[in-house]
Amino acid sequence: MDPIQENQQTALVSRLMKACGGAYTPETRRKYYISGPQWAAAYQGQALFHAPTRPPIGFEEIIRKFAEIGVGYWTTHDTDVIPTEALGTARQWEIVDRIGKALGEHGLKCSMVTTETFFHAVWAAGPAAESPAIREYAKFRVSNTVEIGHTLGASFAVYWPGSLGYYVQGVVEETEALGWYADALNAACERDIEVARSKNRPTLKHCLEAKPFEPQAEILLPTSDAMLAFIASGLLKHPEMVGLNPEYLHELMWGAAPRAALARALIAKKLFHFDINDGYRLKHDVDIGIGLVNPLDWLNVLVLLRSHNYTGPFNLDYKPPRTTSQWGVFEVSFPSAVDRFITLWEMAGEVSCDPIIQEATEALKAGAAVQEGADAEELTRAHRELLTLHELIAHRLFQILIGQHRGRVFIHA
Ligand code: GLT
Ligand code: MN
Ligand code: MN
């Protein structure tokens, strides 16, 4: 092939993207509770060892592009859209007003707001620092985000306490720091109750998001399970208002089975919100698009959520790769991530009503016919053949993933 001229590259990418097929219409995409984060679309590709590869982009353009694609909901950090120095000022409300107009004009809704308590130098010692003045500032920041959320019509507030931890041991007293962190959440909930009452709206759902490592060396709330314990610890004044925003990759990062982590959130009735992406076990937070690494695991995750009637948002918290251009973010990255989610979600519906999986599951639950008082030997023998169904179910899931259950064949015998 001849080298591709610069002015022919978008046409090539568009043509191949179309040739992939399988795209859903924006109307279909809008039927799902899928939200697009401002920070994901605006991510310029920078990291500790990486210079940016894409130019900056503002919320107006992102909201317009999300609308074109069919992403119906938008999420943001306070400082993704409002400069730190403008927070709480008249300028903040001018910007919020502009956001509201852009959302209205393009038919999007703001579903979630979150507070940046990790990037600015003020958070060097975290949002629950020793200094009372910094902790008061943290309370202001989370309460201010709650007000912004209500103004934009959001239903969820997310908290990622990434900088709640330490680099060097012995400086931070963990129980004290967790108590101080709870004070900030309590302030947010109390402000929420006041604002919700004054605006005649329901209170927000406050969702904690765990990540096991980064940016601190040691994190005080590293997993969703740790957060469930924190919610139930007695430190929160309104534990009923606080739940989880697990992120698929963040559970994988510590070596968990994300589906099992979600199951634990479900039985605690705390699965409020879900960040969807992909990546690798025991590696850093690469935030790859959903289904590009672990499609079978993702299918299983969605089977669980479907069967428990999860109705919360699916937040596309991934980072378009550095190799994708700004144009490509909206031509390839977002539409393909949305479409993989929808495909996996619909496929999960097929799993739930697949006759083979259903019968195998029912048979396993019926168990073997055994005499009363059977001993271990007899029980083992009685179930010996039945338990082969475990592997058969896994095989069937693979078939569904690749479409063999619908007659897709690779070799004609
Ligand atoms: C940060 C983190 C994400 C969280 C964001 C919410 S902040 O980008 O890595 O996983 O969802 O505050
Ligand atoms: Mn996340
Ligand atoms: Mn992540």
Image: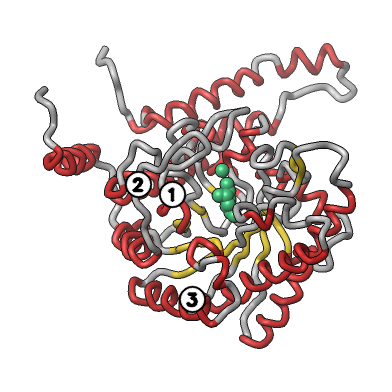
Disc 3: which residue: 96
Lower position in the chain sequence, tag 3 or tag 2: 2
Alpha-carbon span between mark 1 and mark 2? 8 Å
**Spatial separation of the CA atoms under disc 3 and disc 2:** 25 Å
Q: Which residue is mark 2?
A: 54
> Alpha-carbon neighbours of circle 2 within 10 Å: few (<14), some, or many (≥20)?
some
Q: Residue at x 61, y 76 (%)?
A: 147
Element assignment for label 2: loop
Residue in the image at 77% along x and 63% along y: 135
Q: Residue at x 23, y 41 (%)?
A: 17
Give whichever of discs 1 and 2 has the lower sequence position: 1
Residue plotted at (43% across, 32% down) = 400
The structure's colour scheme is secondary structure
Residue 208 vs 192, above or below: the answer is: above
Q: Is residue 389 left or right of residue 51?
A: right
Question: Hey, what amino acid is under mark 2?
Answer: Arg
Q: CA distance from mark 3 to mark 1?
A: 21 Å
- Judging depth in this view, the residue of 42 and 37 nearest the camera is 42
* Spot occupied by residue 270 in the image (x, y as percentages of width and height): 71, 55
Residue 266 visible within the image: no
Residue 8 locus on image (x, y percent)? 12, 40
Ligand 1 closer than 8 Å to label 2 CB: no
What residue is shown with label 1? 43
Which secondary structure, mark 3? Answer: helix
**Residue 390 position by quadrant:** top right
Q: Is residue 20 left or right of residue 117?
A: left
Task: Give the x, y percent position of residue 294.
Answer: 49, 31
Labels 1 and 2 touching (C-beta < 8 A):
yes
**What SS does tag 1 mark?**
loop
Question: At label 3, which amino acid type do we have?
Answer: Val
